[in-house]
Image (cartoon, rainbow, N blue to C red):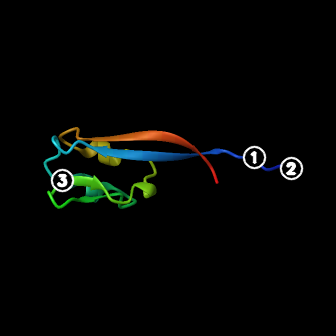
Amino acid sequence: MRGVVKIAAKKFNVLVNGVWCKGCSLCIGVCPKNVLGLSDRLKAEAVNQENCIGCRQCENICPDLAITVQENESEAK
């Protein structure tokens, strides 16, 4: 189609180190898209990964450095 430009949509993975996470839930409270929740073991986990906008607020607030936000490139649909 003429004039249509496909751009790559940014997707993000939120990784939580369960050994380092103490379950303080600061990350859950700061996430604007409700990506994180507490697991049965009372550790943070990504429950709505597809909603992540990559703001890294969870990564920055974590006192235990247990969260990493990674950017992945995927083709827009």
Give the position of the C terminus as an image quadrant.
bottom right
Q: Which residue is mark 1?
A: 5
Q: Residue at x 30, y 43 (%)?
A: 59
Does 70 sit left or right of 61 as displayed?
right
Q: Which residue is mark 3?
A: 43
Element class at badge 1: loop
Three-letter code for the amino acid on which mark 1 is drawn = Val
Number of on-image labels: 3
Indicate the position of residue 26 as horizontal and vertical percent values: 22, 53
Element class at badge 3: loop
Q: Residue at x 71, y 46 (%)?
A: 6
Q: Nearer the viewer, residue 19 or 69?
A: 19
Element class at badge 2: loop
Q: Nearer the viewer, residue 54 or 14?
A: 14
The local crowd at label 2, few if under 14, some if 14 to 19, many if 20 or more residues have their Cα within 10 Å, is: few
Quarter holding residue 61: top left
Does 27 sit left or right of 2 as displayed?
left
Q: Residue at x 27, y 60 (%)?
A: 37
Query: Considering only order in the chain, which callout, 3 or 1, is on the residue closer to the N terminus?
Result: 1
Three-letter code for the amino acid on which mark 3 is drawn = Lys
Indicate the position of residue 69 as horizontal and vertical percent values: 37, 42
Query: Considering only order in the chain, which callout, 2 or 3, is on the residue closer to the N terminus?
Result: 2
How far apart are the alpha carbons under marks 2 and 1?
A: 8 Å
The local crowd at label 3, few if under 14, some if 14 to 19, many if 20 or more residues have their Cα within 10 Å, is: some
Three-letter code for the amino acid on which mark 2 is drawn = Arg
How far apart are the alpha carbons under marks 1 and 3?
A: 42 Å
How far apart are the alpha carbons under marks 3 and 2?
A: 49 Å
Q: Which residue is mark 2?
A: 2
The local crowd at label 1, few if under 14, some if 14 to 19, many if 20 or more residues have their Cα within 10 Å, is: few
Question: CB under 8 Å between callouts 1 and 3?
Answer: no
